[in-house]
Image (spheres, rainbow, N blue to C red):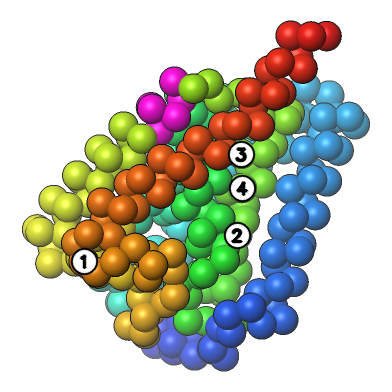
Amino acid sequence: MREIVGKYLDTYDPFILFGTSHIISIVLAIFLSIFIPIFAKKKLSERYQHIVGGVIGYLVMSSYILWTALEITAGTFDLKLHLPIHLCRMANLLLPFVMVARSYLFYEILFFWGLSGMLQAVITPDIAAGFPHFQFFRFWFAHHGMIIALIYATVVYGMRPSLKSVWKAMLALNIFLLLSIIANILLDANYFWICGKPINELGEHVPSLLDYLGPWPWYILAAEFIAFAHFLLAYIPFIFIKKGERAQ
């Protein structure tokens, strides 16, 4: 079993940035991000809305858990590579707090993490395996699924971020940054791309926004301002949404 799983994980066609499968996955995600929340809001009872939300939350969470289980089975699990100390992985694990427990605090944090980090990862994914490998589906489900889930919570559950939510998300982001630094020091790793810019499973450099933010370590500081700007941009539509709701 170990050899079979290990061989499968290491055998794949390479991922092509903005290739056919990349574009199709983005288009499909946009469609599902619109269709699923609207359908659930208009056609499903509250009970089934929560069931669908729970399914989405657990499925997104399982994308990381299943991947980790396969790496353990193959004997290739590496503390330097596979822990949930990247923002997207941690967000995947925390998502059920939003989709199942409907925690507003976790929604505040994950909404901004998801609509900044996840969108960046969708445009410049740090994966080596292309369609139809498990790693391709795992990556896209973890990131696209996260965005779908957050839109679902906003539209169906009626959750809304506030301006204070931006600061909470930034505080949580910096706490996660500090924990990542500690983990990197202890493990000699590069979680959260703190010690170097993104690479894929083959150790190859992956183009990203960080390439335009200067050399290490200055890109880390620049990324703080970019993240804050992204959070504010994600909040702006809710200023108008809240004004419209008050006017009704």
Q: Earlier in the sequence, mark 1 or mark 2?
A: 2
Q: Earlier in the sequence, mark 2 or mark 3?
A: 2
Q: Read off the residue under disc 4.
A: 147
Q: Read off the residue under disc 3.
A: 150
Determine contact: label 2, label 3, CB under 8 Å.
Answer: no
Q: Secondary structure at mark 4?
A: helix
Q: Give the amino acid at mark 1.
A: Trp
Determine contact: label 3, label 1, CB under 8 Å.
Answer: no
Residue at position x 38%, y 27% in the image: 168
How far is the residue under mark 2 from the one under mark 4?
A: 10 Å
Residue 233 or residue 72, whichever sits in front: 233
Q: Residues within 10 Å of mark 4 (few under 14, many from 20)?
A: many
Q: Residues within 10 Å of mark 1 (few under 14, many from 20)?
A: few
Q: Secondary structure at mark 1?
A: loop
Q: Nearer the viewer, mark 3 or mark 1?
A: 1
Q: Nearer the viewer, mark 2 or mark 4?
A: 4
